[in-house]
Structure formats: C-alpha cells, structure tokens
Amino acid sequence: MLGVNGIIGAGIFLTPGTVIKLAGPVAPLAYLLAGLFAGIMAYVFAMAAKYVKTNGACYAYTNAAFGQRVGIYVGVTHAITASIAWGVLASLFVSTLLKVLFPDKPWANDTGLFSVKTLTLVVFIAVLLIINLFGNRVIAWANGISTVGKVFALAVFIAGGLWIVTTQHLNNYATSGSAGGYHPPPFALFGAIEVGHGAAAGLLLATMAALYAFTGFESIANAAEEMHEPDRTLPKAIPLAILGVGAIYVLAVVVAMLLGSNTVVGSDQPVTLAASIHNDVFRSIIIVGALVSMFGINVAGSFGAPRLWTALSDNGILPARLSDQNRFGVPMLAFGVTAALALAFPLALRFDAVNLTGLAVIARFIQFIIVPIALIALARNATGDRAAAKRNAFTDKALPIAAMAISVALAVFFDYRTIFLTAQGRANYFSIVLIVVTFIVVPAIAYVRYYRNRRSA
C-alpha cells in the first residue's frame, strides 16, 4: 500500500491530456511502455533491497556497493531533491484544493510570498507534521485510508465510464487522432538537436511524460529498517505495486479516451481526468479522489524523505542529532529539515513547478543510472550479510544492464531547456543557482565535513 500510495498521485488525474496530445490514439501504449520501464527499474531497486536492509534506498545501495565517496554524493543530492519533490507535491495539492474549493478566486495562481496559497501550504505542512508526530502506526493508517480512497476513485471512474460507454453506445476514441487534439512535437536530443518528427517521436515523448506518473517506487525502500523483513517483503511489494498501478493507469486512460479525448486534451479544469465526465456527481467523486490521492502521496513523501537525512546521519555524514527520535520513533529534527526545504524552495521560486521538478528529474537520472550498477556490484560481493542472499543472473545482471541503458537514453532525450531557460528563452538564473547549490555546493560541504571528522577521529 505504501508503494501504490507513493506512485499514484497527481499524474494520472492531472496530466493524461498531455500524454494523449503527444501520442494520440496510441496513448495507452505510452503508459504500457512507461510501466514496463518503471517495472524493470522497480525490480532493480527491489533486488538491491535484497542485499541492503538499511534506510536510504539509493544512498544505502550505492554506499554498500562503492563506499562513501560515491554514496555521499548520491545520498545528499537525493535527500535534498526528495525534500524539494515533497514541496512540489504539497504546492500542487494546495493549488488544486484552492481551485476546487474557490473556483472564482485567483488564489490558486497567486505567486506572492504573502498570500492565501502560501498560508495554506504552511498549514498543510503542519498537518502532515501532526500526522508524523504520532509515529508509524498513524502513518500506516493515513497511508491505508488514502490508498483505498484513490484506488476507489479510479475504480469508480473506470467502472462508471465503461458503464456509460456500454449503455450509451459512446465511442469518442477516434477524437484522439484529430487535428484539434493530437500534436506530436519534434523529437530532439537534449531538447536541442532535432532528430525526428511524427508518430514515433510523439510516442517516445509521451512515454517519457507518462513515466513520471510512475515515479515514487524508488522511495518505497527509504525506510526499510522500519519494515518487517524488508529483504523478503520489498522484492515482492515493489513489483506488485508497479503492476497494479500500471493496470489502473491503462484502464483509466482508455476509458477517458472513449468518453472524449478532445475534452481531456483541451480541459482547463483542476482535475483533467474528470473533464471527460458530464455527470456532476460522478465528476465530484473523481475530483475528491484526486485530492485524496494527492494528500496520500504527500503523506508518503513526508514519511520517506526525512529517513534519507537520518540514513546520512547514521553513517556520520551529517550530525548525529538528525537521527534523534521522539517517543513515537519519529526523527523530528530530520522532519524539520525536510519540511523547511519543502517550504523554502517553492516559496523562493514562486511556486514554479517546472524549475522545481527539474531538480527531481536530474536526481532521478542519477539514481536510475547508479543503482543498476550498484546492484551488479552487490551481487558480486558474497561477504558478510550478503553471503546468504540468493543470486540470479537475470535479475542481478541482465535487468540492471537493461535499466541502465534505458536510463541513459532517457537522460539524453530529456529537454533540459525547460530547466535552464525561461519560457522566453532567457537564462533562468534561479534554476541554475538552485542546481549548482544542490549538486555541487551542498555535496562539497558534506564531503569536507565527513573527511574532516574522520581525520580528527
């Protein structure tokens, strides 16, 4: 349930129109391909969890495989970007909530530092803090409720949509290929070197867009130490979560396209998936489900991200106080650091989600390339606790190589102009500074502190 909750968030409710616009009639195939890659990568993470049972996910795997020289960099950048990613999820939830509750007010689009949106974001972070204060039992309860809620809403959409299609003999699938909604853009390496155009290029770009609806699986193992037998349960839970989520996504997109692709693509509603529905009660269920879904993924983010900081603290990279827990077992100082970053970056960049998510994208490319290499190295090491782990040539060698190759291709195909340039084509200095601080300055400080403490010891 933590896996399903961590993956299903805003993506399937808010962005299917983008995928349909890029891929047209083959949009479901884009989700299948994205799910296939996510499944491969998820299984790589699951196999790494078989060898490493400590908190930190990609940091723990990298550190166990290559030592602190590589582990520090991956761990610090992942901890920062996970905190920022939570801030993006929180601000997206707040924006959608304000649009739904106050459609006649401009509050959802307000970028001011002192605004209703900022106040709502602060209150929401405080609510998540209260949930976390009472420990894993309350987190498990909130996680379970939100997971059931979002899956129920999507199930209602799928079942109700199919009922409408069947009883009313409705089939608007063909509108997905009409000129009014299907606009595959040119395909370019690094977003600058054009290499293709047409249906194939559109499908590839749509697959990349759909892939981000599957992200979140990489954070499931962040709190492995607090799970029961993680070496046995995680390798089963992560692939099952991907399989279940993938089936839901494909069915939801197919139903939306049957109901009316053109309405989904051209929608300006806060929840675009609901745009294909013309029944008010039915639409309200989907909108509430979207909010529950986004709330749930914030619960998962607020639970997992602080554990990345404690993993670094436990290994002496950051101060030991970060691992201090309250009587419910919650690392309060680590949560405070995470919450501060989750608030600071969206406010500093005036809720510019493009720049904020750009950091998370780059960090994920680093993870998706380094973790497969780490798995190969871990499988070759039969010392210590890893001696008893069962080896498999396919899962320990073939799958990591495939995952690494696909990850490198995605990194090459990503349009980096969205991060480094503004919409007007000028240099985005805020984003550039943020990237330099996240990927150069902070890791350098962590290295200096770690090796200085080692020398003094």
Image: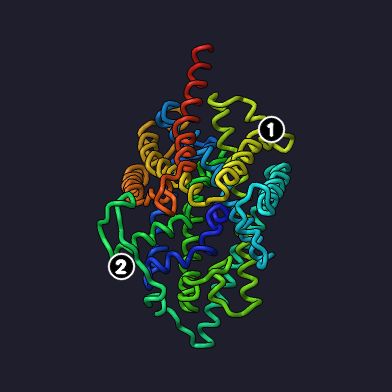
Q: Alpha-carbon distance for marks 2 and 1?
A: 53 Å
- Judged from this view, the residue extending furthest toward the top is 456
For the N terminus, the image quarter is bottom right
- The secondary element bearing badge 2 is classed as helix
**Marking on residue 199:** 2
Q: Which residue is at a point 36% across and 34% down the rendered structure image?
A: 377
Residue 394 seen in the figure: no
- The secondary element bearing badge 1 is classed as loop
Of residues 182 and 365, which is closer to you in this image?
182
- Judged from this view, the residue extending furthest toward the bottom is 168
Name the residue tied to disc 1: 325
Where on the picture, by quarter, is residue 389?
top left
Q: What amino acid is found at the position of numbered circle 1 in the picture?
A: Gln
Relative placement, left or right, of 161 versus 432 is right
The image position of residue 185, as x and y in percent, is: 34, 63
Relative placement, left or right, of 23 versus 288 is left
The image position of residue 294, as x and y in percent, is: 60, 57
Where on the picture, by quarter, is residue 8?
bottom right
Of residues 195 and 323, which is closer to you in this image?
195
